[in-house]
Amino acid sequence: MKGLNILITEDERTQRELLRDFLAREGHMITEAGTGDEALNQVLDGQIDMVLLDFKMPGMNGLETLRKIKGINPSIDIIMMTAYGTVETAVQAMKEGALDYITKPVELDELLLLIDRTAERRTLIRENEILRQKLWKKDMDGGRIIYRSPSMESLINMAGRVAASRATVLIQGESGTGKELFARLIHGTSPRADKPMIVVNCSALPETLLESELFGHEKGSFTGATARRVGRFEEADEGTLFLDEIGELSAPVQVKLLRFLQEREFQRLGGNQTLRADVRIISATNRNLEERMKEGTFRDDLYYRLNVVAMHIPPLRERKEDIELLVSHFITRFARENEKPIEGVSSEAQDLLLKYDYPGNVRELENIIERAAVITRSRVISLRDLPFKDALPHRPGAAVGATGGLMKDSVETLECQLIEQALEKAGGNQTRAADILGITERTLRYKMKKYGLKQ
């Protein structure tokens, strides 16, 4: 861990030198000050990460010095030191922006633990800031990861850490959680960012065509192969290959993928020439691959090759603190696309949006807000603009957002309407409709039967 630039502000010279020598041996860069005024000058003149600040000093005391340092640079972390510690003093220092509070005589091990935690936190903040700057520079409108929850913050940080490596990444999560967005984030902030990222949906093609899609084929290798075809591995050379729905791979394709991960070699379908490609593999699935391994339908050795770095994206129902931010983002986006002056949602509509469980996750919420933005006649999206509205007349006088029957009816009505819209948008193709909704075809067929929709 990189050392910090620490300013020790302590009027007792012996104590100051003791701290200086100890922290310098731990790899930190030390600056000293004997008074509050000297500390302010050091902050103005140098690059300071942290200040160890004595509370009781001649002239300007520690609390006043703290306020002035924070006024110069609020990102500086300050740890107060005092032999006159009281609860009131500690509370006041924390209110004024102190990171923590330690009593004298200072326990060096305790101080070091506190500094190490601070260094780690500053590193994470710096990495996240660099990552955010890279994302905004790429102008990924409609493709940015919008979040507020700690669980997503942790995943963003992990993505930033693994981006610079060559490690394979397995992204797991329900449909519609944003697995491809994370794959694009990792690629886009990696040294391969200026090379192609190729996306292959492993569930969208039958076995023979998928093998040709990935590895290419030679002329005459199968009926209809009238010319040589370059596969996705060759196209992704020096870049990233994102294999979505990796759990759907057939046994023969699993063998070929495993060989590539072990040897970085492959052959085109129907060919005997061994080819090589420098490709980073990121895969994703909404399946439980460990269960599939137990069933014998997914190779253990392939799983461990793919799962060098594992990321699990939580469903939207488990991070509801993100919903309000996502709603605001989608409203801004769809208001612009539809050239409508939409400013937000009503409190009643927001309440219902927060209570819904979103089986289709972020993709489903996006669909709901897009529809509302299209049909609303107001500057504010109301309850009547949401697909829940048709359930309301069944419970006259019922409170908005009430639990029980109304909520159940509202959710079922929403599901039915979204399924109908997706089927219409997909021209009746159930595979495409399921993809739009972010659910499996089996789930779609079950719900169509449940709601009496024509199959």
Image (cartoon, helix red, strand yellow):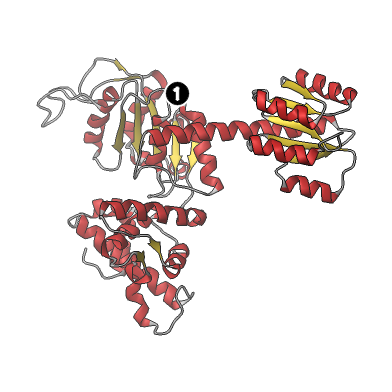
Asked if residue 341 shows in the view, the reply is yes
Q: Residue at x 28, y 67 (%)?
A: 377
* 197 sits left or right of 67 in the view: left
Residue nearest the viewer, comparing 301 with 447: 447
- Above or below 414: residue 188: above
Q: Looking at the picture, does residue 303 appear above or below residue 288? A: above
Foreground: 70 or 196? 70
Number of numbered markers = 1
Residue 260 spot, x, y in % from top left: 36, 23
Q: SS for tag 1?
A: loop
Q: Nearer the viewer, residue 133 or 255?
A: 133
- For the point 42% across and 26% down, the residue is 190
The residue located at (62%, 33%) in the rendering is 122
Quadrant assignment, res 437: bottom left
Return the residue at label 1: 166
* Residue 142, image x, y percentages: 34, 45
The residue at 80%/46% (across/down) is 90
Q: Quadrant of the C terminus?
A: bottom left
Q: Is residue 269 left or right of residue 196?
A: left
Up/down of 286 relative to 372, above or below: above
Hey, what amino acid is under mark 1?
Answer: Arg
Residue 231 in picture, x, y percent from top left? 24, 26
Which quarter of the rendering shows the N terminus? top right
Q: Can residue 307 be seen at all in this image of the molecule?
A: no
